[in-house]
């Protein structure tokens, strides 16, 4: 049988089939292991050892204290900058709604809703960032050269959702203008935790 | 000329272009394969930010702690309770000291889920501080303007 077949094929040819098989296997493997990597970025925070002794630093500019409060579910209930409440109730309600929708979609594993909920959440978070940023810029009396020397202290309720903290850090770190980022506060730290009630 | 080619083609299809393309594809997928993906865990959904600075690569391997939204920490691919984290950090510190390095030289990368509690993030930072680590970065997903 084999003899007859080889006689019939007049041209001497390398059999490509095994190679193509292997090549396709490889291609499939690499295709399936492909993962789109999301771009990540860092925020430096300054938490030196013995942070409680931070008051001993000779920084003439008083730190900017941002206090964020949360309810039992971790939703943001207020942001205070230097003791003054700076976020309106309407935005807080929007934040809570967006968070709740997102959590619900995540719990139901509803893909179509999840995408929408995530987008809505990011939009509201951006609003929060902008509101905070306007207030922080205001606090410097538009003299932004001071900002880089200033320290920001975040005083957050322990239950608060971390998303909002990052929104606040984003607001304080820099202003986005087109493709550029104008740096604001570079020294960010967490306030020493409060005693458990 | 056209007639000649027809006779040369015989019965089988010319595989060369297909193999060319296939090899190109393999090369592309090979180069896009990254081995650092172990660090990006799907169980942690980072918060997004527009101004997060690009990740700096230092020569010293950073210590990555990932916080899930249920309050558990992923450390070296292991699930660790927040309260037990101190023991693991103690090991890490011992390893560093053995290599003649101070814990303070290492950067601790905190990859916390956006839905986790801020108190837990602070707890991680405090545990690290107790062991002598004091350089921290909070990681966020960069979302361009």
Image (cartoon, coloured by chain):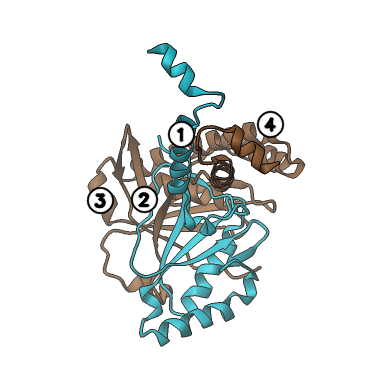
Chain colours: A brown, B cyan
Q: Is residue B94 left or right of residue B66?
A: left
Of the 4 image quadrants, the one containing the C terminus of chain B is top left
Tell me which corner region of the image, top left, top right, bottom left or bottom right, holds residue B84. bottom right
Which chain is mark 1 on?
B
Image: B33 above or below A16: below
Query: Is the Cβ of the residue at disc 2 closer than 8 Å to that at disc 4?
Result: no
Query: Residues under labels 1 and 3: Cα distance?
Result: 58 Å
Say which element carries label 4: helix
Residue receiving disc 4: A112
Distance Cα–Cα, label 1 vs label 4: 35 Å
Where in the figure is residue B132, as x and y percent of width and height?
43, 79
Q: Are marks 3 and 2 on the same chain?
A: no
Distance, label 3 to label 2, CA atoms, is 24 Å
**Residue sitting at x 43%, y 44%:** B27
Q: Secondary structure at mark 3?
A: helix
Q: Are marks 1 and 3 in contact (CB under 8 Å)?
A: no
Q: Position of residue A61 (x, y in %)?
A: 28, 58
Read off the residue under disc 3. A146
Of all chains, the one bearing label 4 is: A
Near-viewer residue (B127 or A2) = A2
B21 in relation to A61, above or below: above
What residue lies at 71% left-to-right and 39% top-to-bottom? A105
Q: Which residue is mark 2?
A: B54
Q: Are marks 2 and 1 on the same chain?
A: yes
């Amino acid at each position: 049988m084999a003899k007859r077949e080889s006689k019939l094929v007049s041209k001497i040819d390398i059999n490509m089939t095994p190679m193509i098989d292997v090549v396709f296997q490889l291609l499939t493997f690499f295709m399936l292991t492909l993962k789109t990597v999301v771009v990540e970025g860092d925020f430096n925070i300054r938490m030196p050892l013995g942070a409680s002794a931070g008051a001993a630093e000779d920084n003439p500019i008083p730190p900017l204290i941002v206090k964020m409060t949360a309810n039992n579910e971790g939703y943001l209930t207020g942001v205070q900058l230097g003791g003054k409440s700076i976020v309106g109730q309407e935005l807080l309600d929007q934040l809570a709604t967006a968070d709740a929708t997102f959590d619900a979609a995540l719990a139901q594993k509803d893909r179509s809703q999840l995408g929408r909920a995530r987008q809505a959440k990011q939009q509201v978070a951006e609003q929060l960032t902008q509101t905070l940023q306007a207030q922080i810029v205001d606090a410097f009396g538009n003299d932004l050269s001071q900002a880089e020397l200033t320290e920001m202290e975040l005083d957050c309720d322990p239950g608060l959702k971390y998303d909002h903290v990052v929104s606040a850090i984003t607001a304080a770190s820099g202003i986005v203008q087109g493709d550029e980022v104008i740096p604001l506060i570079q020294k960010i730290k967490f306030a020493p935790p409060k005693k458990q009630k | 000329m056209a007639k000649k080619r027809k006779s040369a083609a015989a019965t089988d299809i010319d595989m060369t272009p297909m193999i060319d393309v296939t090899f190109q594809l393999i090369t592309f997928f090979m180069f896009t394969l990254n081995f650092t993906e172990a660090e990006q865990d799907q169980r942690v959904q980072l918060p997004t930010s527009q101004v997060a600075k690009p990740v700096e690569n230092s020569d010293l391997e950073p210590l990555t702690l990932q916080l899930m939204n249920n309050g558990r920490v992923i450390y070296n691919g292991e699930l660790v309770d927040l309260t037990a984290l101190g023991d693991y950090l103690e090991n890490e510190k011992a390893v560093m000291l053995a290599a003649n390095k101070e814990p303070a030289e290492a950067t601790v990368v905190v990859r916390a889920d956006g839905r986790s509690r801020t108190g837990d993030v602070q707890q991680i930072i405090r545990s690290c501080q107790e062991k002598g680590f004091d350089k921290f970065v909070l990681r966020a997903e960069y979302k361009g303007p």
